[in-house]
Image (cartoon, rainbow, N blue to C red):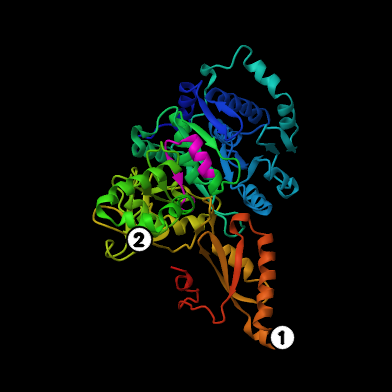
Amino acid sequence: MESIQNFNTLIEKSIIENWNLDALTDYKGITLQYHDVARKIEKLHIMFESSGVKRGDKIALCGRNSAGWASAFLATLTYGAVAVPILHEFTADQIHNIVNHSDAKLLFAGDVVSTQVDPTKMPHIEGIIYIPDYSLLFSRSDKLTFAREHLNEMFGKKYPKYFRPEHVKYYKEESPDEMALINYTSGTTGFSKGVMIPYRAIWSNFDFACHAMGSNVKKGDNVLSVLPMAHMYGMAFEFIYEFLKGCHIFYLNRVPSPAIIAKAFSEVKPAIVIAVPLIIEKIIKKKVFPKIQNNRMRLLLNMPVINKKVRQTIREQVVEAFGGKFFEVIIGGAAFNQEVEAFLKRIEFPYTVGYGATECAPIICYADYHEFKQGSCGKVAIHNEIRIDSRDPQNIPGEILVRGLNVMLGYYKNEEATRQTIDKDGWYHTGDLGVMDYEGNVFIKGRSKYMLLGANGQNIYPEEIEDKLNSMAMVNESIVIQEEDRLVGLVHPDTEVAQSMGFTHSDLENIMEQNRKELNAVLPSYSKISSIRIQDEEFEKTPKKSIKRFLYLKG
């Protein structure tokens, strides 16, 4: 094992060294300084201890990004408990599933989530804590209720004078392989896998970010958190890295539409921009393309003498759209629109595309914009190695395999899935196909797992939606595809029944519209279907009878 630093010691160190600096701001709301975060952590530790939470117990967090969420997460790790971050856009049933499967003892719930969850559906939970003020929404434990009611008094007794930096002493993980958190790849029973992330993987991703950013991100810098912290991508690179560096993190606590994000970028002026392709594409298509797609601009761009000057002007406008102060824009999570990527390359915009997976907490590949090769997703990140499972890795796509500090411990309570994913030599099988050139740049050629990415970085598993759709009226088989940022269901109807009932094409369309409404009623907002299209012919299949999805994707 490499010389891995103790992760909770890094949290302790950052809080003490940055005591009077701004730490976490709810955009257009409260700001917590590092010492405020320390006080919140201390109060939560008193609450955990008094209510009988032990090291290794699971604590779930479900709510929109906020200073309160971040503080509760840090309190969980530094107490020695295991955090279970849950995407706030999951349905109530999905949240209940994850809380129950993870054996969570407590649930921190955000403002919206708190009105949706039902304690009776989570029989083993001891309490639900409201994220905005840590009040108790529900309790099965007298000790927890007493602790919350007397919290300020208990805090005052423990620290009668002042709460000072020397009081900050946290639990130190005993081994780099100790589990820090369980991150669920999805919320549906049967599909959901709890990825067990060890401390070494969180530290390794932090250490990678320190190497990758160098001195470009430093103490006191601003950063805008747009991606959900319940996802490893947002957690690792818009929260943990910056918090440990002494940055000031701003949380967008409203639904991040392109207009809101663009406004926040111009006000916060972040030192680094972390994003999924759709955010970048939308801002560029809405804010930049209209300005440059008129005839005059096209003409100027094609004149060699003026071309460079025009490109520079356009680049300045695009840089300004993201706040104007960032080192680079890192894009990850899904394939990048080639038209937008070619445009950014042409104007020499400082962007790069990375590659990761929840199972690697998350980084697998990266190269900064100076070295980044267009169309690739960078080179293998430090502390890890990568292999393409192909007889000719430079030319014939093979499965991308990863081994190293970033790789998870396995799936919680699912040894079979773990065995299928991590082989006896420690290689994590990503399920993604790619090639690697002689310089080590990785090019992804397809996702054999079919995962789609929602507009704000949520993982969408089409098989789950299809599972529900296939059991609906007149549906014989279906696939769900993504077009731009919308999901479309392609359905081959039950033609025999349709003929016997005398249904017309118009009747079938009405039935499918009704199906769509019923389906959307049980899906989280980010995975709702925008339309259902009828496929008259049966879908083409492989010898194993699975649908050849790639034939139906709009390329």
Residue at mark 1 to residue at mark 2: CA–CA distance: 48 Å
| Residue indicated by mark 1 | 501
| Residue indicated by mark 2 | 434
Query: Going by the image, does 159 lie left or right of 433?
Result: right
Name the element at disc 2.
strand
Whole-percent x, y for residue 139 in the image: 74, 37
Sooner in the amino-acid sequence: mark 1 or mark 2: 2
Whole-percent x, y for residue 337 in the image: 42, 58
Q: Which residues fall within the magenta stretch? A: 261-279
Amino acid type, mark 2: Gly
Vertical placement of 29 versus 230: above or below?
Answer: above
Q: Please name the residue shown 58% across and 28% down the image.
A: 31
Query: Going by the image, does 410 lie left or right of 342?
Result: right
Name the element at disc 1.
helix
Whether residue 186 appears in magenta in the rendering, the answer is no
Vertical placement of 214 versus 415: above or below?
Answer: above
Mark yes or no: residue 401 visible. Answer: no
Task: Determine the image quadrant of residue 154.
Answer: top right
